[in-house]
Amino acid sequence: MQIVDIVGDVSGKNILLLQGPMGRFFNQLEHKFMALDATTFRIGLNAGDEFFADARHFTPFRGRIEEWKSFISEFYIQHSIDMIFVFGDCRFYQSDKGVCI
């Protein structure tokens, strides 16, 4: 099974990877997307996210929780995000309370 069989055509899409599991999983996913002509972005919330991310595509969020909705909305619009991939839905930032797009 190929990645496109799971997520569909990503060619030409702007994809946001929001945080991610510890380890290299999102890096591997990011490279698969880039090989299919997608542009990827990463937003991280802590030093671990930054450590595992490719610095070329990484944006840290260091604001207060009250600033998150404004930050993510502006990021989404500024980068014309077509798809968002999140790891988990129990953290505020990945929940429906945090992602207001």
Image (cartoon, helix red, strand yellow):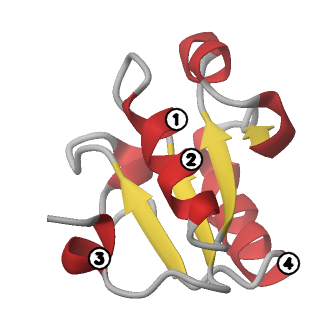
Q: Amino acid at mark 1?
A: Asn
Task: Describe residue 92's horizontal placement relative to residue 82 as left or right.
Answer: left
| Label 3 – label 1 distance at C-alpha | 16 Å
Callouts 4 and 3 close, C-beta under 8 Å = no
Residue 31, label in figure = 2
Pick whichever, 97 or 1, lies toward us.
1
Q: Give the labeled residue for mark 3.
A: 7
* Tag 4: amino acid: Gln
Give coordinates of residue 22: x percent, y percent.
Answer: 37, 18
Q: Secondary structure at mark 1?
A: helix
Nearer-N-terminus badge (2/3): 3
Amino acid type, callout 3: Val
Residue located beneath label 1 in the image: 27
At which x and y percent is residue 17?
52, 53
Of 78 and 56, the residue lying toward us:
56
* Residue 69 x, y percent position in the rendering: 61, 64
Disc 1 to disc 4, C-alpha distance: 23 Å
**Residue depicted at 62% across the width and 34% down the height:** 44
Which is in the foreground here, disc 1 or disc 2? 2
The residue labelled by disc 4 is 78
Q: Earlier in the sequence, mark 1 or mark 4?
A: 1
Category of crowding for the residue at label 2, using alpha-carbon neighbours closer than 10 angstroms: few (below 14), some (14–19), many (at least 20): some
Neighbours of disc 3 within 10 Å: few (<14), some (14-19), many (20+) = few
Mark 1, other Cα within 10 Å: few <14 / some 14–19 / many ≥20: some
